[in-house]
């Protein structure tokens, strides 16, 4: 990747996905088709007239030749995405056992966790409803990659000890929200195509580093690969 950039790091291609992180980027040039996720608290910009904004906790599919300027940008090379269950097995991803008690069934595989880095996040931006005066705190960010076969329900849950967003890399998935752990209580669906992110962690409150989520699950409309980004409060 040609670039004019400070503090850019190739993180890993060991698990079948080429991932890099730019803590500070100035006119970062895409030499491939890339999905770029703004994992920080500041807006980044792609060149254009006028420039196109990449907001915090959002992502976009950029074509070769695009240039971006901003901080805390996570880049996924779309030329290197495993798209079959047989591929992720060979790469050493582990099968995640789904629990029928949580509506979970299908095929779900998870890569090893990858540490991205430590960044500041303004909690007033990301908690819902916004409480105000929470201020900026340091989080350590990790990435997990997931594969689910078409039709998989990945389990209705509401427990996390971290902030989480999801970025779709391949296929079409749906983030579903529920009133309870029963599927017939579904209330909301966010459809995820490649390059889109669940742009809010949708946690409802924060206290002592604990985060409260509504019941939710990922549903794979097709065979899917996505990235879960986990923010652990320091």
Image (cartoon, grey):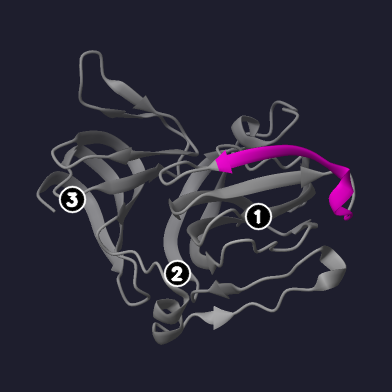
Circles 3, 1 touching at the beta carbon (< 8 Å)? no
Q: Give x and y (percent) for residue 166.
A: 55, 50
Q: Which mark is residue 32?
A: 3
State the quadrant of the C terminus.
Answer: bottom right
- Residue 178 in the image: above or below residue 83: above
| CA separation in Å, label 3 and label 2 | 22 Å
Which span is picked out in magenta? Answer: 181-191
Which residue is tagged 1?
Answer: 218
Identify the residue position indicated by label 2 in the image: 114
Q: Is residue 34 left or right of residue 84?
A: left
N-terminal of the pair, mark 3 or mark 2, is 3
Residue 232 falls in image quadrant: bottom right
Categorize mark 3 by other alpha carbons within 10 Å: few (<14), some (14-19), many (20+): some
- Front-lying residue, 218 or 28: 218
Which class describes the residues within 10 Å of circle 1: few (<14), some (14-19), or many (20+)? many
- Badge nearest the viewer, 3 or 2: 3
Q: Residues within 10 Å of mark 2 (few under 14, many from 20)?
A: some
Q: Secondary structure at mark 2?
A: strand
What residue sits 65% from the left and 55% below the top? 219
Say which residue appears at 72% left-offset and 59% top-offset. Answer: 161
Mark 2 → mark 1, Cα distance in angstroms: 21 Å
């Amino acid at each position: 990747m040609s670039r004019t950039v400070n503090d850019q790091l190739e993180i890993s291609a060991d698990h079948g996905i080429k991932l890099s992180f730019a803590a500070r980027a100035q006119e970062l040039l895409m030499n491939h088709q890339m999905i770029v996720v703004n994992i920080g608290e500041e807006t980044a910009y792609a060149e254009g007239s006028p420039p196109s904004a990449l907001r915090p906790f959002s992502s976009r599919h950029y074509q070769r030749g695009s240039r971006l300027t901003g901080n805390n940008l996570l880049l996924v090379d779309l030329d290197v995405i495993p798209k079959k269950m047989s591929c992720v097995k060979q790469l050493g991803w582990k099968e995640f056992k789904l629990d029928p008690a949580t509506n979970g069934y299908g095929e779900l595989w998870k890569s090893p966790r990858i540490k991205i880095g430590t960044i500041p996040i303004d909690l007033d931006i990301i908690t819902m409803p916004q409480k105000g005066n929470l201020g900026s705190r340091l989080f350590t960010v990790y990435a997990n990659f997931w594969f689910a076969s078409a039709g998989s329900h990945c389990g209705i849950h509401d427990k996390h000890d971290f902030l989480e967003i999801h970025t779709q890399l391949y296929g079409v998935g749906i983030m579903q929200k529920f009133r309870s752990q029963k599927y017939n209580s579904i209330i909301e669906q966010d459809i995820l195509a490649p390059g889109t992110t669940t742009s809010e962690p949708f946690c409802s409150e924060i206290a002592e580093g604990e985060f409260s989520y509504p019941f939710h699950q990922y549903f794979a409309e097709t065979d899917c690969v996505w990235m879960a980004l986990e923010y652990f409060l320091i």
